[in-house]
Amino acid sequence: MGAVVGATLLALVLSSCVTNNEGLIPVADNVHVDRVDEIAADLPREVAASGRLIAGTNIPYAPNEFKDEAGNIVGFDVDLLNAVGKVLGLTVAYKQADFDKIIPAVQAGTYTMGMSSFTDSKEREESVDFVTYYRAGIQWAQRTGESVDPNNACGLRVGVQTTTTEDIDEVPAKSEACVAAGRPPIKKVKFDSQDDVANALILGRVDALSADSPVTAYAIKRSGGRLEAAGEVFDSAPYGWPLVKGSPLAPVLQRAMQYLIDGGQYQQIADNWGVGSGTIAQSQINGAAG
């Protein structure tokens, strides 16, 4: 019983640090989207017959995908993919999964696609195709009033969400540079969710966090002034929806996405969530830089 009480108290402490909502979920009723028959007509027969897209997602990663107080999956990515679904006359069913299991599940046919702020990289393109829909960089955060330099973080504890670009590539590369210069490595501290990363920073368990720029900005916004940006946004790269390699659905999703870009609904959705600075003018299939 003592362990259960301790876990409950810890949950209460964490919930007082960073929460998903705090009035930061926009009302998206200013965005009107209709089915576009000439795009929907090109859907693969099995997808059209099912009437839905099944999207694997990892929760929480606010503001892109997370749960509101009622337990509904919401976010910028969710509003955008729902709009794509409307263009195609499809509903979207969201299935929660560990981040690192989503792409294998897409490859196995368990999900139609992934939707979890995936960075479109050349390495990932060897396994799946991506339809791009946004461009994000990496942004570090620190406790307000402290001084953390992402380019001079040797010896610091840096929180990341497991299996993200920051976990796999960015922080390890910075740490290796520290060691090569004869300095102490960065201590990378991994967490299962981005909320856990932000709470660890607030509570002093790490010295900084590294995450995608819209995620860091949202964490700062809902931290009640306890967090602030550390350094500038860097290493900008596209987000994409992963699909089976060579999937005939990819060009249809790309056309639906481009329709929303050209019609202005895409920008409205992004602006609703405060992430309008990362919008793109052209959706691509496999848009990673070489």
Image: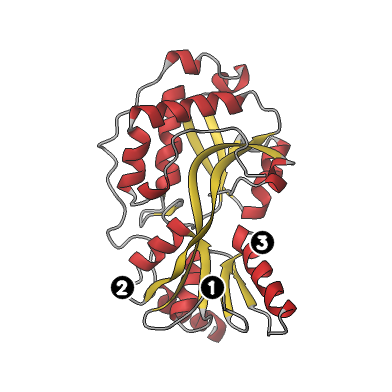
Q: Are marks 1 and 2 in contact (CB under 8 Å)?
A: no
Residue bearing mark 1: 150
Residue 169 — which label? 3
Please name which of the two marks, 3 or 1, marks the residue nearer to the observer.
1
Identified at 40% across, 62% down, the residue is 217
Separation of residues labelled 3 and 2 (CA atoms): 30 Å
Residue bearing mark 2: 224
Q: The residue tagged with tag 1: helix, strand or loop?
A: loop
Q: Are marks 3 and 1 in contact (CB under 8 Å)?
A: no
Q: Quadrant of the N terminus?
A: bottom right
Could you say where residue 56 lies in the image, as x and y percent from the top left? 58, 44
Asked where in the image residue 230 lies, by quadrant, the reply is: bottom left
Q: Quadrant of the C terminus?
A: top right
**In the rendered view, would you say 178 is above or below 164?**
below
Q: The residue tagged with tag 3: helix, strand or loop?
A: helix
Residue 243 is at least partly visible in this image: yes
Which of disc 2 and disc 3 is earlier in sequence?
A: 3
Identified at 39% across, 20% down, the residue is 35
Task: Identify residue type, mark 2.
Answer: Gly
